[in-house]
Image (spheres, rainbow, N blue to C red):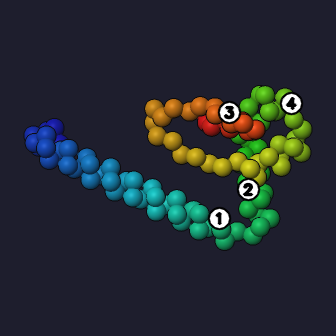
């Protein structure tokens, strides 16, 4: 667009539209993946969750060093994915009886 000397206002609108289309496609892909995941058998879902989440848990030294593989496998079913925006704060919140680790 620089070579064609496109006005800044139009370039901004084009970039905004491209960004909008990209985000929309990303959301549609996520919905399709969830639909496919929900069609899997119970045992395949569990196997997939265990394998994906075990890698996350085993990469956290305080968990991997202090808990058995069996416990970590059971813990994989309690992991909830949370999407965060770039530059968003990630923190620990200590409640009365619970420790939430968000990352």
Q: Residue at x 75, y 70 (%)?
A: 41
Eye-nearest disc, 2 or 3: 3
Q: CA distance from mark 1 to mark 2?
A: 9 Å
Badge 4 vs badge 3, beta-carbon distance below 8 Å: no
- Vertically, is 95 above or below 77? above
Q: Residue at x 52, y 63 (%)?
A: 31
Secondary structure of the residue carrying tag 3 is: strand
**Foreground residue, 53 or 83?**
83
Q: Which mark is residue 94?
A: 3
Eye-nearest disc, 1 or 3: 3
Q: CA distance from mark 2 to mark 3?
A: 30 Å
Badge 2 vs badge 3, beta-carbon distance below 8 Å: no
Badge 1 vs badge 3, beta-carbon distance below 8 Å: no
The residue at the far front in this view is: 96
Q: CA distance from mark 1 to mark 3?
A: 33 Å
Would you name the residue on which mark 4 appears? Answer: 66
Q: Which mark is residue 37?
A: 1
Answer with mark 2 or mark 4, whichever residue precedes in sequence.
2
Would you name the residue on which mark 2 appears? Answer: 48
Answer with mark 1 or mark 4, whichever residue precedes in sequence.
1
Secondary structure of the residue carrying tag 1 is: helix
């Amino acid at each position: 667009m620089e070579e064609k000397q496109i006005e800044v206002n139009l370039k901004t609108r084009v970039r905004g539209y491209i960004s909008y289309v990209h985000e929309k496609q990303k959301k549609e892909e996520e919905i399709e993946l969830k639909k496919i995941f929900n069609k899997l058998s119970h045992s395949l879902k569990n196997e997939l969750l265990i394998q994906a989440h075990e890698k996350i848990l085993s990469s956290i030294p305080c968990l991997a060093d202090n808990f058995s593989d069996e416990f970590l496998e059971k813990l994989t079913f309690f992991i909830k994915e949370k999407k965060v925006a770039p530059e968003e704060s990630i923190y620990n919140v200590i409640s009365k009886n619970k420790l939430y680790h968000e990352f």
